[in-house]
Image (tube, rainbow, N blue to C red):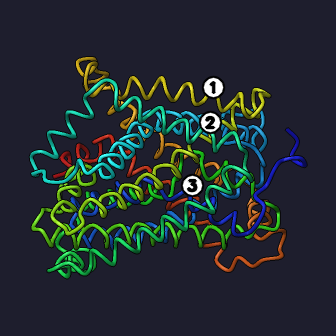
Amino acid sequence: MSIEKRVTFGSKLGVVLATVGCAVGLGNIWRFPYMTGVNGGAAFLLIYFVCIIFLGFPVMVTEFFIGRKSRRNAAGAFKVMAPGTKWSIIGYNGVFAAFFILGFYAVVSGWTLEYIYQAFSGSLSGKSAIDFKEDFDSFAGSDFRPILWTFLFVLMTHLIIISGVKKGIERASKIMMPILFLILIILCVRSVTLPNAHLGLDFLFKPDFSKINSSVILSAMGQAFFSLSIGMGCLITYSSYFGKETNLQHTALQVTVLDTLVAILAGIMIFPAVFSFGIEPTAGPELVFITLPNVFNQLPLGNIWSLIFFILLGVAALTSTISLHEVATAYMHEEYKMTRSRAALFVSGGILILGIISSLSMGRLSDYTIFGLNFFDFLDYITAKIMLPLGGMLICIYVGFRVDRKVLKAELTNEGTVPFYFFNTYAFFMKYVAPIAIGLIFLNELGLLSKFQKLFV
């Protein structure tokens, strides 16, 4: 596919909403609240803000540079910009990371459909906290229903992807992102009007600085990259559809602000409700599928609030799966000269295979492990703890040491037509600060940092 004929998003609004949809997803609605809960609330949020501003935003700008400059998929981008070198491994890492993440994300996304169905049918009413846990464990470990919902979610994603960039991704983003913000605001208003809601808001916004330690700092950095979809090829792929007139700096700023706003709204939605009913905010990953249904069950019209929430979670999940699917589809489409439909079919088929194995690994195949992890947890581990931080770090090193600063500045300023007032600061961060920070995340996620600390204590 020639650069000249490459499709682009149809409008400035489409660019922003599609890219926000790429960044916003389960990482904001599902992962951010429980990470905040287990890491001390406002103290974690404060460090998260710092990481977003000084690390997340610059790295996002860098991925935008690579995508638009190359006008190719995540792997093809490095073949264009560094031909004949081994830097293309960064792109392949992003493509495989996106594909592997979909292998378990599709399962979690399918769970949202199950809970939408249960909320709609009234099945979530009248249950105790123990009932919610037992029901979830029974459902997740069963053979048929999780796989059925996974198939339906992959099918929805597939249909949007084969519709193309403008008629599929951009159009879906223009519909889903306003819906997501609207539902979030409705649930936030309901949450803050509950008795003792101020306790949850205090937890979220009044930092206890004694909670800040190296673990919290590294967890906040990791969440910042996870939330912004950095290192998984999504931002490179989406920015390859940007027009030459797109202001990369402003787009990155808009996406960063809106993505962070969604995460904060998710916290406002969840923590006042959790504190209102005396539930510990440190519930962890089960917060969404076990703890929150128990909270909604104690509210008047609880089924309606549950239904609204799980629709929100489903929309967030769909924005995630679309962006991840597009990374792999664009790669197959461009590098193997397939039609878009055929490439998407191969990717969807592969996702279903991984999804079926991931789902069964929580039940029938639970005794089969890889390095002590079931297949679901193994895919989560190698992507979140190895592939994403490694990819993000290598991107920073590549741009910091390989790309000519004049070329970088020309692309980020649209050939000098838009200003970049802090370019030297940005370049310094990309070359030195960001790789070290991401390297620390990498070591921490592998559990190596704590071993190094013990050697010097």
Please say if 335 is above or below 36: above
359 to the left or right of 65: left
Q: Is residue 373 visible?
A: no
Relative image position of residue 216 (x, y in whole percent): 27, 61
Check disc 2 and report the residue beneath it. 328
Q: Is residue 228 above or below residue 185?
A: above
Under circle 2, the secondary element is helix
What amino acid type should be assigned to the residue bearing mark 2?
Answer: Ala
Labels 2 and 1: the sequence-earlier one: 2
Q: Quadrant of residue 268?
A: bottom left
**Residue type at mark 3?**
Cys
Of pointers 3 and 1, the one earlier in the residue sequence: 3
Rate crowding at label 1 as few (under 14), some (14 to 19) or many (20 or more) other CA atoms within 10 Å.
Answer: few
Residue indicated by mark 1: 346
The residue drawn where x is 46% and y is 55% is 316
Residue 176, percent from left and from top: 55, 60
Q: What x and y, as percent, mark residue 231?
A: 53, 48
